[in-house]
Image (tube, rainbow, N blue to C red):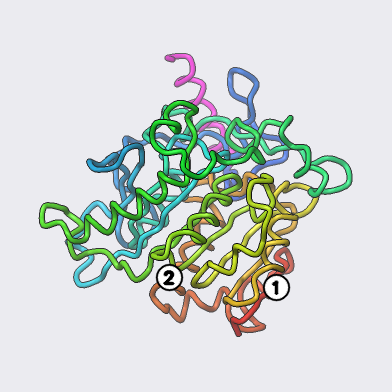
Amino acid sequence: MTQRLILGFLLALTLAAAGLSAQQPTPTPLLDGRGLPLPFGVPPYFKPEVPLGNGPFKAAMSEMGGLSAHVVYAPADLTKLGARKLPVLIWANGSCLYAGNRYRQFLTEVASHGYLVIAGGPMGPVELEVGPQSNPAVRQGGAGAAARGAAGGRGDRGAAPTQAPPAPGAGRENAAADKRVTLDMLKEAVDWAVKQDADSASRFQHKLDLNHIVSMGHSCGGVLAIQLAEQENRINGLGVWFSGVGLTGGNADPSALQKVKGPVLIITGDETLDVGYPAGKRTFEAIAHLPVFYAWRDRLQHIGTFGARDGGDLGVLATNWLDWTTRNDATAAKMFKAAGCTLCKDPTWHVQKKKMD
């Protein structure tokens, strides 16, 4: 353990000296002591209770009573909110990984802008926050071929990204057995948030905006996020990251998307680097009844920028999307609305929209 900490410290110093940016994963990443890639370098580690994030409400993460296996991200000092209420984000990890602290950089950034975030999975090992990540290989012929056969590659969090999520109805007992987040765990998170807002003993009493409960997830977690939005009436927004209908084979029927409510965000990498590209495109094409923003970015890998400091570019994108769709923030809307939207004018992004402008 001492040697690993020393290695991490030296790598961090190397990055600082070189002035490297950690917004996008480097194509020639540093390697840890086991030879595993560190595409965002070695970010500094902070204890869970340390408030972080670029938003006006520095946020911390914790495990809280009443939840079976989840990590909660929220502003550390709720008194600073004033009359402002917290919209709720329910998050599912890539690979349906059973560790709610895995996306700490990204989810803390979101929470620091005034959101309650509940991630499936308990607090996992520290190295899951600052350790190695690898992009699943895309087979020759594009992402479509990879999506059909990526189970043999190692994914965004050390498991095959296109592995099907646990079957609906697999609750806490099954999740604990195979260490994967389930749909029932995400439904539990919604129930918990609703109870917290009404509970006089809760620090969140009357501080949550239950009119805006959004489901989001990455890769395998994106499949769960879609299923939650299809089955849970209290969900009124959906974010699908590097994922979509048919990614795992377990949600191949696009007709179920007709049950989804609220605005939909779909983000993927490009076809040569992201196994989720065809599923994201397929999901956009299948939705005709809702506002949908779909975009993919040149050279963006399946692992995205979630592991970069504050979630990198995707942290900025996510907070602007939520600020617009849950708070009607006109400045945040400029990133997505109208022909001249910020992402529309960026030549590295390729944007399609429905029922938005």
> Which numbered mark, 1 or 2, is in the foreground of this view?
1
Residue 190: mark: none
Relative to the observer, which residue lies in front, 25 or 88? 88
**Residues at circles 1 and 2 in contact by the CB criterion of under 8 Å:** no
* 309 to the left or right of 137: left
Q: Secondary structure at mark 1?
A: strand
Q: Which residue is farthest right? A: 141
> Along the polypeptide, which appears first: circle 1 or circle 2?
2
Seen in the picture, residue 266 relative to 345 is either above or below; the reply is above
Disc 1 marks which residue? 352
Residue pictured at 49% horizontal, 72% vertical:
262
* Prevailing SS of the magenta stretch: helix
Seen in the picture, residue 230 relative to 340 is either above or below; the reply is above
Relative to the observer, which residue lies in front, 346 or 178? 178
Q: Where does the C terminus fall, quadrant-wise? A: bottom right
Cα gap from disc 1 to disc 2, whole angstroms: 20 Å
Q: Where does the N terminus fall, quadrant-wise? A: top left
Dot 2, how many residues are within 10 Å of its Cα: few (below 14), some (14-19), or many (20+)?
many
Residue pictured at 45% horizontal, 81% vertical:
330
Q: Secondary structure at mark 2?
A: helix
Seen in the picture, residue 329 relative to 279 is either above or below; the reply is below
Residue pictured at 42% horizontal, 45% vertical:
184
Which of the 4 quarters of the picture holds residue 123? top left
In the rendered structure, which segment of residues is drawn in magenta? 1-18
* 295 to the left or right of 144: left
Identify the amino acid type marked 2.
Answer: Asp
Residue 83 screen position, x and y as percent: 20, 72
254 falls in the magenta region: no
Residue 233 screen position, x and y as percent: 42, 65
Disc 2 marks which residue? 323
Identify the amino acid type marked 1.
Answer: Gln
- How many numbered circles are shown? 2
